[in-house]
Amino acid sequence: MKQIFLGLAFGIAAALFGARAAVAQDASIAAVVNGQVITDDDVANRARLLALSSGMPATPDIVARLKPQITQELIDQTLQMQEIDKRNVVVPESDIETAIGHIEQGNNLPAGGLRARMQASGISFATLVSQIRTEIGWQSVLHQVLGPELQPTSGDIRAEKTALKDQIGTTQYHLAEIFIPVTDPADESTARNFAATVIQQLRAGAPFPVVAAQFSQAQTALQGGDLGFVPLSQLDPSVAAVVVTMPAGAVSNPVRVPGGYDIVQMQGTHQVGSSMSTTLSIRQAFAPYPEPISNGQVGPAQAAVISKLVQASHGVHSCPDMEALNAQFGNVRPADPGPVDLASVTPPAFQTILANLPPGRVSQPLVAQDGVSVVTVCSKQTNAVGLPSDDQITQVIIERRVELESQQLLDDLRHRSIITEE
């Protein structure tokens, strides 16, 4: 299902780099978009964010290698921001808070955990807020442009439902994506090299949702690139040919598609109308470390917290016991995260733990960078996966139309703009 936790580009928001057109005397100009300046400092900051979030060293060589692609992303983001301002679109603060909450939930972070992680990496939280505001504002622009044509008719829904019925018994694929655009044939090799760099870090362990949220240019960016379950017929043929060969958890090589490159992650499959879905009710207890794990090494302070939680969990024999244990450690995260779709649980190792955990038994400690958790399963419910509801079908059609309009409007803005690159 198309959603994204943000199609980000840095450097032009006032909250991050100061007034939009202001340029320090010693700052070099990377590009000018309708009179609005993007500096080399903006590009370097964007590259350093990529390095910090995906585990790359922020060396001058890496920053230089990423510069061409990031400059193009900044140009597109500037065009989006200009159109948002032109249409007087205002993004409610509550929408920004909701998007941040989705990012934290998708990465198993407590409320406020994303801010803490960014600050620990030396990145202003205002950077993220500006990115989310632009992504949401762009969505509002697209809805304005589409107007009444955005909503599907009853005939559109019937046609989509007929197509879905024809797919009963076929396989659907739960995918996440990162889309890297190619706006000029001269940028082909640059975009592919950028994609290869991103893939290298993903395969080294960088979380796919975080990387997708920061660097994907698809509309799925605000929810970490999650496409949901899709049939092969809805995928570009080049992507479809790749995903049928991928095991769960795998990350593809760059796939050339119209407009750029796709990177996809296989998260699972199911048979339409015949596969089973398992929903879990769980309780968890989370104990934060006094300071996060660094360099992948558990130090004495973290080890002490892990040991304390494990010892305390020996007295847990039920879900109410787990709720009490979580309260004992400060209720930093909610004891009840809500219904959990087992098929969507990542990483695969955690999915396996939950699948094999008998109700009432406490899991082994689940160690993360900022703390440690134990969980217990309260109940499991398994049901056949049926066709989506009319409301879900409506949402799919809307998202498809928004995605198409986004590409068309951005192409039009490029053609009508004065853009120079140094």
Image (cartoon, rainbow, N blue to C red):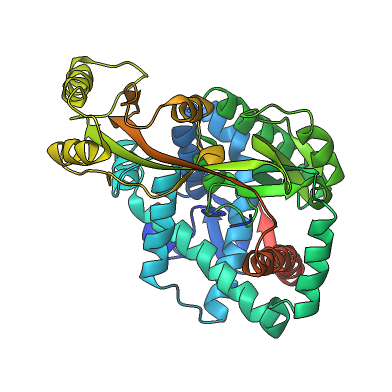
Q: Would residue 413 appear left or right of 319 to someone viewing this image?
A: right
Q: Would residue 266 appear left or right of 295 to someone viewing this image?
A: right
Relative to 249, residue 36 above or below: below
Locate residue 404: give its quadrant.
bottom right
Nearest the viewer among 39 and 201 is 201
Q: Residue furthest left?
A: 328
Locate residue 174: give its quadrant.
top right
Nearest the viewer among 345 and 339 is 339
Taking the image as drawn, is residue 31 in sight? no
Give x and y (percent) for residue 329.
16, 36
Question: Which residue is at a point 20% across and 44% down the rendered structure image?
Answer: 331
Taking the image as drawn, is residue 116 in sight? yes
Give x and y (percent) for residue 263.
69, 38
Nearest the viewer among 126 and 166 is 166
Give x and y (percent) for residue 357.
42, 26
Relative to 364, residue 283 above or below: below
Give x and y (percent) for residue 212.
56, 44
**Quarter of the image with the N terminus in it:** bottom right
Nearest the viewer among 342 and 396 is 342
Question: Which residue is at a point 60% across and 40% down the rendered structure image?
Answer: 67
